[in-house]
Amino acid sequence: KPEFAFIGRSNVGKSSLINMLCNHKGLAKTSATPGKTLLINHFIINNDWYLVDLPGYGFAKRSKTVQKKLDQMITSYILQRQQLVNTFVLIDIRHDPMKIDTDFINWLGESSVPFSIIFTKADKLGPVRAKQNAAKWMNSLKEQWEELPPYFITSSEKKLGRDEVLDYVGNILNEIKATE
Ligand code: GDP
């Protein structure tokens, strides 16, 4: 079954987003203590696709050795997994572009891995500033890339962007089924 991976810096709101997408409160463990996911978790959705919860990158409080192991696990999964059809990179909408995120995105692009961007915690800014920040963020990618990936503005708190992300996944699944 096709897999869609979710990744981002620790505390970006990944667990909350996964729970929102699955309509499930406790599927992915949310916590105020970042850096908890140390494994690649697969959640089956509608018996149709796998939502893949990847560990966060760039977590300062992890030891270098642990983070290095995780980075190896993440990169080999992304590069080698045949079922992986798209990687969602999560970005906290309040933050300006950070090197660790743009480095990761550039690596995906250079490796020809299909990806899209999910901005999280939009409720913390309100609709107007959320849109502005997302546009600013996407614009910064233009320095590196001619073509920009799709992006989604979400809030797990306010249940925003759920349908957009799930429709996007649904469309890709339909395309795959059509070619089978
Ligand atoms: P993870 O470490 O990336 O899995 O992040 P979590 O989902 O555990 O969330 C980290 C923190 O951000 C928690 O305190 C959440 O309550 C908070 N958070 C996550 N999503 C949202 C959101 O959409 N809006 C707001 N206001 N807070 C959020």
Image: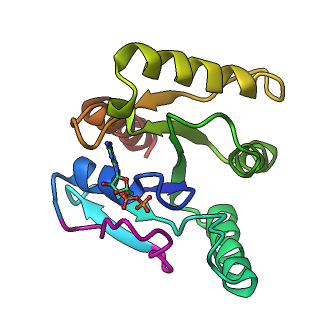
Based on the displayed image, in which of its 4 quarters is residue 68 positioned? bottom right
* Residue 129 falls in image quadrant: top left
Residue 34 highlighted magenta (yes or no): yes
Image position, residue 135 (x, y; %): 58, 18
Question: Which residues make up the magenta segment?
Answer: 26-40
Location of the N terminus (image quadrant): bottom left
Colour scheme of the rendered structure: rainbow
Question: What count of labels does the image hold?
Answer: 0
Q: Which of 155 and 5 is in front in this view?
A: 155
Q: Position of residue 138 (x, y in %)?
A: 64, 24
Please state the horizontal and vertical placement of residue 131, each as a whole percent of the image: 46, 17
Q: Which residue is drawn at 73% across and 28% down?
A: 141
How would you classify the magenta stretch by its main secondary structure? Answer: loop
- Where residue 121 appears, x then y in whole percent? 38, 39
Residue drawn at (66%, 69%) of the image: 60
Query: Residue 88, relative to residue 75: is it above or below?
Result: above
Q: Which of 172 and 162 is in front in this view?
A: 162
Q: In which quarter of the image is residue 170?
A: top left
Which residue sits at x=48%, y=56%? 5
30 lies left or right of 62: left
On whether residue 142 falls in the magenta region, the answer is: no
